[in-house]
Image: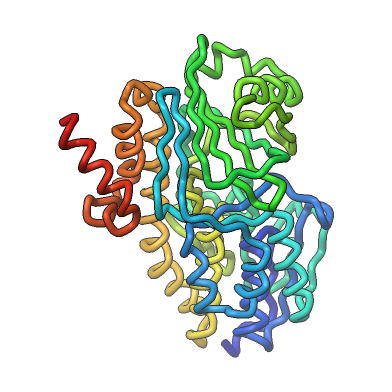
Amino acid sequence: MSQLSTIEILGGGPGGLYTAILIRRLLPHVKVRVTEQNPEGATFGFGVVFSDRALDFLKADDAETHDLIVPHMERWQDMTLNLPKGQVTLDGVGFTAVGRLELIEILKDRARDLGVEIRFKTRIDSLDEFDADLVIGADGLNSLMRQSFEDQFKPKIEYFDNHFAWFGATIPFDTLTQTFIETDKGPLNAHHYRFAPDRSTFIVECEDATYKAFGFDAMSEEESAKLCSTLFADVLKGTDLVMNKSNWRQFPRLWCESWIAGRNVLLGDAVHTAHFSIGSGTRLAMEDAIALIHALKDHDDIDEALAAYQAQRPPVARKIVDAANTSATWYESFGEKLRLAPMDFAHDYLMRSGRMTPERLHQIAPKFAADYEAYSAVHG
């Protein structure tokens, strides 16, 4: 890529930092700088979850970074559904998790070791402040780049009906767990998993009617954390939820028709979102980075490289995004599904994304598949 000498990256999350790492590895002659508006060491959220084999792409493309991350990850092979009528274990539905801040620190140190300049606590108000051959927007849902070239990126954004709040917990959980409860004001669900030996992510979710019945919209962050700690006291073992910008939100469904606008290009949550129920947001951002930087490496012309990225990456990402959206839609009516017997609920849950088949179920969760067949033979 002889034309390319300078790249600016907007956003210092996992996607932006990993993009910078790839540039130093694959385009060593290119000067790269990362700009992040938040202070160094500050991050929002708790743990980042990956499906069990989701980091295989990283091992294949960048074994050194992979080997830096893996020792810090929590790993488990089963998933647990806690239901009002009983508990079901789903074998083989493995996941890994790492603290978001820990992941950012690992990637930040790796980037700096490779010679990347990183500016923290630097707010950019206009892309005119950059003077580079290429500017990469890895600046998340509220992307300045996407907003600056909205007519070219052509984003479409909608919101799911459910409301959720992202908390932390000071106790670990053995597996990724979904805890569903019924209350006099409606059903709620918690997605919870450990990302460190003594810390967990704890996402509370409910349908719109339940959200309004509890009055979460009128509560402070502290009030809703206290109430949710009480509602899920059994699984939390009486501990209090931890807050970190744990405001109630509705998940955005974002997709941009174009990922490039001249010499400006988007990746990660700036260009698409994937619902947290399938744990693919960070993975998608890192895979976007791999596709983009390999395209720049493989083409001498910048515009041809960006066109290749536009042609090749969105169709691949779209499959995962669509599966995530289908999964999210399942949660929009999880209260109705609580009427099902636990085994039927669990089967319905596993089939929610539309990507699961009976054959694949036998491969992924052979014990549950066999148990469900035996259960169905008796209960029809």
Residue at 42% x, 66% y: name it: 313
Scheme by which the image is coloured = rainbow
Q: Quadrant of residue 263?
A: bottom right
Q: Residue at x 57, y 87 (%)?
A: 1
In front: 372, or 200?
Answer: 372
Could you say where residue 281 lies in the image, as x and y percent from the top left? Answer: 53, 53
Q: Is residue 25 left or right of residue 38?
A: left
What's the residue at 46%, 46% (across, down)? 79
Toward which corner of the image does residue 362 lie, by quadrant?
A: bottom left
Question: Observer-nearest residue: 164 or 350?
Answer: 350
Indicate the quadrant containing the C terminus: top left, top right, bottom left or bottom right. Answer: top left
Q: Residue 18 lies in what quarter of the image?
A: bottom right
Pick the residue in front: 88 or 314: 88
Give the answer, above or below, for where 179 lies relative to 91: above
Q: Is residue 133 visible?
A: no
Marks counted in the figure total 0
Question: Residue 340 in the image: x percent, y percent?
Answer: 31, 25
Place of residue 299 in the rendered image (x, y in percent of width and height, measured from the top left): 48, 85
Question: Is residue 176 at all visible to an observer of this figure?
Answer: yes
Query: Residue 209 placed where, x, y %?
Result: 48, 16
321 left or right of 111 in image: left
For image coordinates 52% across by 45% down, the residue present is 176
Q: Is residue 283 above or below residue 276?
A: below
- Relative vertical location of residue 55 with respect to residue 377 in this rendering, above or below: below
The answer to which of 69 and 94 lies nearer the viewer is 94
